[in-house]
Every structure is written in C-alpha cells, then in structure tokens.
Image (cartoon, rainbow, N blue to C red):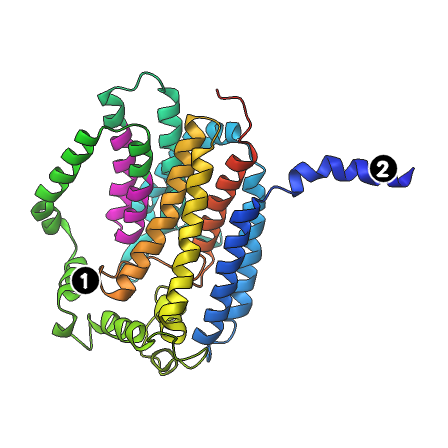
Amino acid sequence: MRINERRSLWRRMRPYVAVFDGPLLTILVLLLTTSLVTLYSASIGIPGKIEDQIRNIFMCFFVMWMVSNISPQNMMRIALPAYVITISLLVAVALVGTIKLGARRWLHIGVIDIQPSEFAKLAVPLMLAWFFQQRQGHLRWHSYVIGAVLLLLPVFLIARQPDLGTALLVVAAGLSVIFLAGLPWKALLALIVGAAASMPVAWSMLHDYQRERVMTLIDPTSDPLGKGFHIIQSTIAVGSGGMTGKGWTHGTQAHLEFIPERTTDFIFAVYSEEFGLIGNLFLMLLYLLLIGRGLMISAGAPNFFTRLLAGATTMIFFTYAFVNMGMVSGILPVVGVPLPFMSYGGTALLTLGIASGILMSIQRNRKLVQT
C-alpha cells in the first residue's frame, strides 16, 4: 500500500519536477562546465571565484526551474505589470539612482543595490509579445509604431545612464519581436536606411568615452597603454592560441595579467589562448546548438505570443555571444557584455537562467490549444 502511495505522490510531483527540456539542458550543462574549467584557470590568484560561480549556477538552475513551472498564460498576465514596474524603476534610477564608476545604473532598496536595466532585457520582449498577441489578425502599420515606442522608452532610459551594452541587448530582443510579428521587409529596410542616415546625429549624442571606444576600435595603437590596451591584449591572446592552444592554465596573457577583466567580459580571450581554434569551434558549436534549439522551440510554440517570446529569448543568447566575441576579437567596440553562461557573475547568469526557463516552459506547454 505504501508503494502505491509513493507512486501516486511521484505522479503528482513529476509535472513540477521534470520540467527541463533535455536537449536545452544538455547544451547548458556543457557550456557551464566549460565555463568552470576556463574560470578556474582565469581566476588563479583570485580566491573565491569558483565557489561563488558554483553558487551562481545553482541559483541559475533554481530560477530556471521556477520559471519553467510558470505557464505561458501566466506569463501573458504578468507581461504588462512587469513592463510598468521596470519603467518605474528605470525612472527612479534616473531621479535618485546610485552613481558608481561615473554611471547612474543602480537603485538602492533596503540593504541591496539592484540594476533595473537587467529586468528590461526580459520585460520588454515579454511586453511586446503580449502587445502583438492582443492584435493578432488585425495588425496595422500603427501597431508597429506603438511597438517601437514601447521599445524605445526603456532603451532611452537605459542609454542615458549610460549603459550602451544593455541598451543594445534590449534593442536586439525588442526588434526581434517586432520583426517576427510580421514587420514588412520594406519597413525594415526603411529603418536600416534611417538608422544609417541618423549616424551623424547619434555620434553627436554619444558620451566622450563612447566616442573614444569607437575610435579605439578603428586604431587601438593610438593609445596602446590606455584606451586601446583592452583590445590589443585580447586580440593578442586570441591569436596566440593558434590551432590547439597553449594548454589549460598555461595561457601567458592571462596569468601575467595582461588581460583585464579576464574572469568576466574577457573570459573568451583566456579560453581562446588556452584552447585555440579547435576550442573556439567547439564553443561556437555549443552556441549554434543553443540558438538552434531556441528557434526549434519557437517554431513549435503553441500560439503567437509564445512564438514571439521564444524567438526574442533566443535572440538574447545570440546577441550576448556575438557582441562579446566581437569585442574580444577587436571587430566591435568594448561595451561590457558578458559571454553567456561563460563569464563570471550572478546577475547576468540569473537573467540567462530566466530566459532558459521561459524556453523550457514554452516547450513544456507546446500542446496547448492555440488561443
């Protein structure tokens, strides 16, 4: 009789425990394992990093599990409140935010400092997916204009902090929702032309340090010991890895401390130096599989809302990886974007865990009747 009771309890609990998507979970475990291996080498001489990151990973999986248990219907219900709260927090940051390192990005609440711009990475695509879901079947040109306004409002508040890296991630996620909602190619082309034409105006609105980053990208040797130091040293590390790398824990650029922020934004330089081109191909394959799995979940999503949300979440992964690898390799300006599931840090890993949980929830509920 006790055996039957145990089976009955497991059957009741299983839908809430076995919520992880197998292929996606396997990719994430491989990425996080690679991260710990690289972080061990990058953090030699910096005690506590591995222990902290393991704790961050456990927190990531816990949050992922929690979000996986939230149904897409409930995600639709919280979309508008989440967006309103995020905008309110961003406005509060602009008015009474804490200034650190010359940027007003944090809000002091109680005994902790929070960074509301992190919430925008998920709240904005969630809101846009809900907005277009409400207008499915009767989308007009003004629907896309309203969607653009909903996107540009938080982007403006984040960019003026200033936080160009996070603003770029929010733009990528939001634009992917607008594009997947059916934005015509002609309108997209017009946006691209308009953006190109507005470059002189945008350049004049950039902060001095942001202009310096762009100019340093063009010619890092103009200030090799100052603004160009990051790019020069990271590209040396990437190139010196060769085909097979110098070997684990044998990277000279990292261990002689030539690579700045080697456990966070520039961990890809450490990985490239020690594992070489073959290691980079393996890492890129993992990211391609991650993005591919996300697109598969989006294609099989049960309704318009989940399809848009899954596509935007996948775009977050792509943008993180593309921008980070681009700036470490010297083809994009340094904007402070971590490498997803590789860089040390709790906040970004928490955001990525929520994004992964969203994909798993959508996959888990793929048999829902379309509404």
The image position of residue 16, as x and y in percent, is 65, 39
Q: Quadrant of residue 86?
A: top left
Residue lying at 43% horizontally and 34% vertically, measured from the top left: 299
- Left or right relative to 111: residue 157: left
The image position of residue 216, as x and y in percent, is 16, 66
Amino acid, disc 2: Glu
- Left or right relative to 185: residue 2: right
User: Which tag, 1 or 2, sits closer to the chain's start?
Assistant: 2
Residue at which label 2 appears: 5
Q: Nearer the viewer, residue 7 or 85?
A: 7
Amino acid, disc 1: Arg
Q: Nearer the viewer, residue 120 or 337?
A: 337
Residue lying farthest top? 138
Circle number at residue 213? 1
Q: Is residue 282 above or below residue 63?
A: below
Q: Main secondary structure of the magenta part?
A: helix
Residue lying at 21% horizontally and 31% vertically, measured from the top left: 185
The image position of residue 341, as x and y in percent, is 45, 57
> Secondary structure under badge 1?
helix
